[in-house]
Image (cartoon, rainbow, N blue to C red):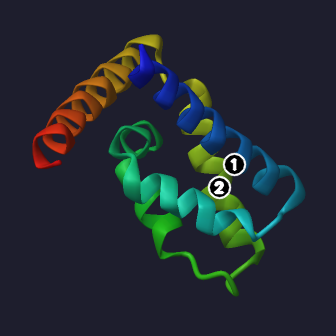
Amino acid sequence: MQSVAALQALSSSAVCVLSILCIDGFHTGVQELKEVLRTVPEVQELVGKEESRKLLSVKEQDGGIGVRSYLKSAFTKLMVASEEAVSEAIAKLKSRLNAESKVNIFSE
C-alpha cells in the first residue's frame, strides 16, 4: 500500500511539474522533473524513452519552444497512458520498492 501511495505521489508530482512548466513556462521545475525521470524508472517508462531522453538532455538556459515542446509531449504521454500501463507501472514500482526495502533491512 505504501508503494502505491509513493507512485501516486511521484506521478502527481511529475504531472504537477509538467503542468506548471507547460502552462507557465517555469524553468525551475525542469531540474525537479529530471530528478523524477532519473530516479523513478516507472514514470520514465510512462513518459517514454525518447521524451525522457530529450527532457534529460535539456539545459536550464535552453528555454524556448524546444523545452516547451518536450514538456508538452511528456505531459501528453502521461495523460493518455492507458489504465493498463499505469497499473503495470504501479506493480513494477511496488515490486522495486519492496525489494529495495528488504535490501535496506538486511544492510542495517
| Marking on residue 65 | none
Q: Residue furthest bottom?
A: 61
Left or right of 80, for residue 65: right
- Where is residue 67, by image quadrant? bottom right
Q: Are marks 1 and 2 in contact (CB under 8 Å)?
A: yes
Foreground of the two, 30 or 5: 5
Query: Which residue is disc 2 drawn over?
Result: 71
SS at mark 2 in the image: helix
Give percent across and percent down for residue 33. Answer: 58, 57
Q: Is residue 18 above or below residue 95?
A: below
Q: Quadrant of the N terminus?
A: top left
- Where is residue 97, by image quadrant? top left
Left or right of 38, for residue 55: right
SS at mark 1 in the image: helix
Query: Which residue is disc 1 drawn over?
Result: 18
**Count of picture labels:** 2
Q: Residue furthest right?
A: 24
Q: Residue furthest left?
A: 106
Q: Residues within 10 Å of mark 2 (few under 14, many from 20)?
A: many
- The residue at the point 58 percent across, 32 percent down is 9
Q: From mark 1 to mark 2, how far is it between C-alphas?
A: 6 Å
